[in-house]
Image: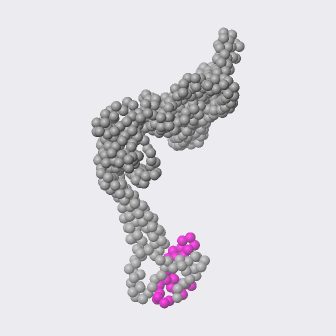
């Protein structure tokens, strides 16, 4: 459900405003109403960029953390100066890494160039030069090189690589030179270059070890610095959100507090002598949303927040949609073995994790995996294999009546879609009921009832022909359907005349009929995606058997294991993506559309220390 909120107005003398914010932050329950966007305040933008840089630095450093790193039980306390220095230290390590890698690449190029000439002593060339002889290094294509250059210029061939001849000449400075490309050699001989490369690579290894040491022992400093900057951002943001009054002598600030926390906050602020006034919530107010659900529904709140938070005047859709999302996810995954594997992995991760957010995510994955294990088993597919109970030779009619196959799977997808649409329309009616009153919601209730009992009448009429005792039920369903249609056509706009209502009802009939068909058919993708995952799993199984079957014993099991691990791993990844994207769309998009939810609410974010 959505937590009730109180709206407050705070009026503070400008010289006391900063100390007031400290008191307000200590209460930790006030959501400050923003009147200025972050992009309009340069200091806030700079803090955001700084936090982005810290996050990027931590992301780059995380892979260097060793497996046996000492656990950090407490977050270190750092000053802004110390935190800034920690970031600089890490950035220096990464800058040095880039420098060393570039130097190694350049050194390898020098070595490649010198390897063409082999190892020689540069001091010998210097002695020749001091004696009046000059040694020059040349490269020429094999076709352009002339053997007589040895007599004319004293050319000596050193190497030939890919139709290029590398040679040297020794002579006086003023002797004629061959028509070839003159080569400038590196400053060091080959053995020295090798040693320089080894030294650079040793420095690179030391750099990696330094990053590991930092990640193992000082990562907490970066986390503490990020929290410090988060607090500074929140405080700076609070400073700029107040509106100056009476020539900026007074600061006017609006805020929101959960009703359950309002009384202690009022007492704490009033005790300091600050002016506080509770305001009436208006329809146009952007009230922050705080969701409050039971342990099960709370696991699915991140999906609601990811799609769209409800408005304050609406309902919390999380507990309403969690069962649908679980079922749709399971139908899309469509494999009992994959579901069991997901459940086991989520359980192990939940046990080992110390993070509350990770535990919550793993809890949701446990429910999704467990539901998939059950639904996938009913579909008769486990790790891409068709189980005996899914065949025609075992369980006989029981399999056809109670297990899912391609025929009843498609029907089930459509039925589930229709049920969610009908449910969403009843929710739309209830939302209108609590917002405006029952008479304004009656037409919406009537449309939902018309669709529900119309579908039931369509199903029960053929049964009534073979079972006469169901005739009364079929007649009752038809009567309810007709009554609902009359209400929807003639009482959809309370207060208007019957002709206006009838016209509006006809238009609503067209919209409902056209939208209902398209919305219902869109749920067929549950069947299609689930079927695709099962087929892909079976393809990888067959591929492993066909390729590994003809190989020698021992090798065949290794090849089969590699194909199965790669194939099923890829299939699980694809199924996971599809099973999150499409159920979210079907669950939330269709629900919001048919329930007439507006969404777009802002999440409640209390002003407090990180």
Range of residues picked out in magenta = 147-175
Pinpoint residue 86: horizontal percent, then vertical percent. 33, 54
Pinpoint residue 322: horizontal percent, then vertical percent. 50, 30
Compared across the picture, whether 153 is left or right of 32 comes to right
Q: Identify which residue is drawn at 43% across, 28% down.
A: 294
Residue furthest front as drawn: 246
Pinpoint residue 131: horizontal percent, then vertical percent. 40, 88
In the figure, residue 93 lies in which quadrant? bottom left
Looking at the rendered image, the quarter that the C terminus falls into is top left
**Does residue 520 appear anywhere in the picture?**
yes
**Does residue 303 appear anywhere in the picture?**
no
Q: Relative to 516, is 170 above or below? A: below
Q: Identify which residue is drawn at 58% across, 82% down.
A: 146
Q: Is residue 444 magenta?
A: no
Compared across the picture, whether 7 is left or right of 547 comes to left
Q: Relative to 96, is 293 above or below? A: above
Q: Is residue 160 magenta?
A: yes
Q: Identify which residue is drawn at 64% across, 23% down.
A: 491
Q: Identify which residue is drawn at 41% across, 81% down.
A: 125
Q: Relative to 459, is 304 above or below? A: below
Closer-to-camera residue (160/108): 108
Closer-to-camera residue (237/517): 237
Residue furthest top as drawn: 469
Closer-to-camera residue (532/83): 83
In the figure, residue 455 lies in which quadrant? top right
């Amino acid at each position: 459900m959505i937590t009730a909120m109180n709206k407050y107005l705070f009026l503070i003398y400008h010289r006391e405003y900063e100390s007031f914010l400290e008191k307000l932050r200590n209460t930790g329950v006030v959501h400050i109403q923003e009147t200025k966007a972050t992009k309009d305040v340069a200091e806030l933008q700079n803090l955001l960029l700084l936090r982005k840089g810290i996050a990027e630095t931590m992301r780059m450093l995380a892979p260097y953390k060793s497996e046996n790193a000492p656990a950090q039980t407490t977050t270190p306390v750092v000053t802004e100066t110390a935190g800034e220095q920690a970031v600089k230290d890490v950035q220096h390590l990464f800058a040095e890494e880039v420098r060393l890698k570039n130097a190694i690449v350049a050194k390898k190029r020098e070595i490649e160039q010198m390897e063409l000439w082999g190892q020689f002593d540069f001091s010998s060339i210097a002695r020749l030069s001091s004696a009046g002889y000059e040694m020059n290094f040349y490269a020429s294509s094999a076709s352009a090189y002339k053997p007589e250059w040895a007599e004319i210029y004293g050319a000596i061939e050193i190497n030939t690589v890919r139709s290029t001849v590398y040679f040297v000449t020794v002579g006086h400075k003023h002797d004629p030179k061959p028509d070839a490309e003159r080569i400038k050699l590196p400053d060091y001989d080959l053995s020295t270059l090798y040693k320089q490369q080894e030294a650079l690579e040793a420095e690179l290894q030391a750099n990696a070890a330094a990053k590991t040491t930092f990640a193992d022992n000082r990562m907490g400093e970066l986390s503490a610095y990020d929290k410090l900057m988060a607090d500074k951002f929140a405080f700076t943001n609070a400073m700029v959100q107040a509106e100056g009054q009476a020539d900026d002598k007074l600061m006017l600030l609006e805020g929101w507090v959960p009703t359950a926390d309002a009384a202690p906050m009022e007492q704490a602020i009033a005790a300091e002598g600050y002016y506080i006034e509770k305001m009436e919530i208006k329809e146009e107010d952007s009230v922050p949303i705080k969701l409050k659900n039971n342990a099960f529904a709370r696991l699915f709140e991140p999906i609601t927040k990811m799609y769209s938070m409800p408005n304050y005047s609406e309902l919390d859709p999380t507990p309403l949609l969690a069962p649908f999302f679980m079922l749709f996810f399971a139908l899309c995954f469509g494999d009992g073995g994959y579901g069991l594997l997901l459940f086991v992995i989520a359980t192990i991760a939940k046990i080992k994790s110390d993070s509350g957010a990770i535990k919550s995510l793993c809890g949701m994955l446990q429910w999704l995996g467990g539901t998939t294990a059950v639904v996938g088993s009913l579909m008769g597919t486990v790790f891409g294999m068709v189980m005996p109970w899914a065949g025609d030779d075992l369980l006989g009619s029981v399999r056809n009546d109670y297990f899912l196959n391609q025929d009843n799977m498609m029907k089930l997808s459509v039925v589930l879609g229709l049920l969610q649409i009908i449910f969403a329309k009843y929710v739309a009616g209830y939302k209108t009921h609590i917002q405006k009153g029952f008479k304004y919601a009656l037409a919406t209730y009537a449309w939902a009832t018309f669709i529900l009992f119309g579908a039931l009448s369509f199903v029960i009429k053929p049964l009534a022909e073979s079972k006469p005792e169901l005739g009364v039920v079929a007649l009752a369903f038809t009567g309810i359907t007709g009554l609902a249609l009359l209400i929807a056509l003639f009482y959809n706009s309370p207060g208007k005349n019957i002709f206006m209502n009838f016209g509006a009802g006809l238009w609503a009939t067209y919209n409902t009929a056209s939208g209902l068909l398209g919305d219902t058919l869109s749920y067929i993708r549950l069947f299609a995606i689930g079927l695709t995952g099962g087929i892909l799993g079976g393809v990888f199984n067959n591929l492993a058997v066909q390729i590994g079957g003809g190989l020698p014993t021992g090798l065949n099991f290794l090849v089969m294991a590699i194909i199965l691990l790669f194939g099923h791993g890829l299939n699980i990844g694809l199924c996971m993506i599809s099973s999150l994207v499409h159920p979210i769309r079907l669950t939330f998009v269709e629900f919001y559309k048919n329930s007439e939810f507006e969404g777009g609410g802002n999440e409640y974010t209390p002003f407090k220390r990180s």
